[in-house]
Image (tube, grey):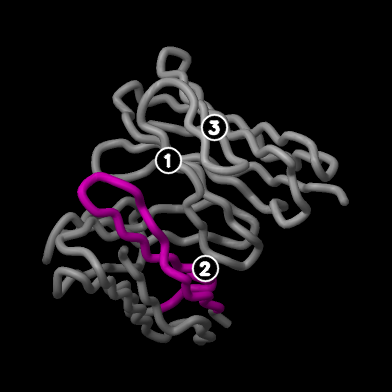
Amino acid sequence: QKEVEQNSGPLSVPEGAIASLNCTYSDRGSQSFFWYRQYSGKSPELIMSIYSNGDKEDGRFTAQLNKASQYVSLLIRDSQPSDSATYLCAADSSYKLIFGSGTRLLVRP
Amino acid sequence: SQTIHQWPATLVQPVGSPLSLECTVEGTSNPNLYWYRQAAGRGLQLLFYSVGIGQISSEVPQNLSASRPQDRQFILSSKKLLLSDSGFYLCACRANGGEQYFGPGTRLTVT
C-alpha cells in the first residue's frame, strides 16, 4: 500500500515565526509532489508543487524535496494567523495522487 | 486555467434515497477526473477516477458509482444512500499529469 505520512499536529507557532511541515512517502516511483492548504469547511487549495530535488520558493512558502530520503517539507516564513489551516502533502502514483492525512497548523497572534 | 463546478453545494437526503452529484470542468481537455470523500475531521478518501470518457476506476467498494458521459463531466451516483455516506464530496481535475485542482465540494448529510 503506497502511503504518504504526516504528523497530524497541531503544530502551534507564534505569529512571525517559521512553520515547518514535513511528510514522507513510500512510492520511490513518485516524481511529483504537492502541498495543499485546507481551511475548515473548504476544499483543498494547491499552494506548491515540486518535481526535482532541492528547494522551490514562492513568496513566503518554500517546498523542499529529497528523493533519496523520500522526504518533502514545506516552510512558511513570517507565519500569519490566516495561515492556520490543515496542510496536505501529496505524491503522485500512476494516475492519482496519494494524500497524507494532513497537519493542522495553528498560528498564535 | 481550469475551473471546476460542483453542485449542489449542500444536500440533505434521507437514508435509502438516490444521489446524483455532478462535476463539470472548464478550461482543459481530456483531463483526469477524480471523486473524493472527506468525512468530518478526516483525510481525503479517493472514491473513483477516470482517465477518459466512459473509463472509471473504483478505489473503494461501496454503494456508490461514477460515470463520465462527456470529456469534462463526471457524475457520482447512488441508488440508496446510507448514513455512512455523509461527508464532503470533492471533484478534482488533473491535466497532462500536472497539478491537480479541487472543486468547491458538496456537503452531503444523510439523515
Label 1 amino acid? Ser
Few, some or many residues within 10 Å of mark 2 (<14, 14–19, 20+)? many
Label 3 – label 1 distance at C-alpha: 17 Å
Disc number lying in front (2 or 1): 1
Q: Which residue is under mark 2?
A: B88
Q: Chain of mark 1?
A: A
Q: Which residue is under mark 1?
A: A49
Q: Which residue is under mark 3?
A: A5
* Local SS, label 2: strand
Residue B103 on image: x %, y %: 42, 68
Task: Give the mark nearer the N terminus: 3 vs 1.
Answer: 3
Residues flagged by tags 3 and 1 on a common chain: yes
Q: Residue at x 60, y 46 (%)?
A: A87
Q: Quadrant of residue B5?
A: bottom left
Does A6 appear above or below A15? above
* Local SS, label 1: strand
Label 3 amino acid? Glu
Does B57 appear above or below B54? above
Outermost top residue: A68
The span picked out in magenta is B81-109
Residue B29 on image: x %, y %: 16, 63
- Between B54 and B5, the one nearer to me in the picture: B5
Residue A94 on image: x %, y %: 25, 38
Q: Is residue B75 visible from the viewing direction of this image? A: yes
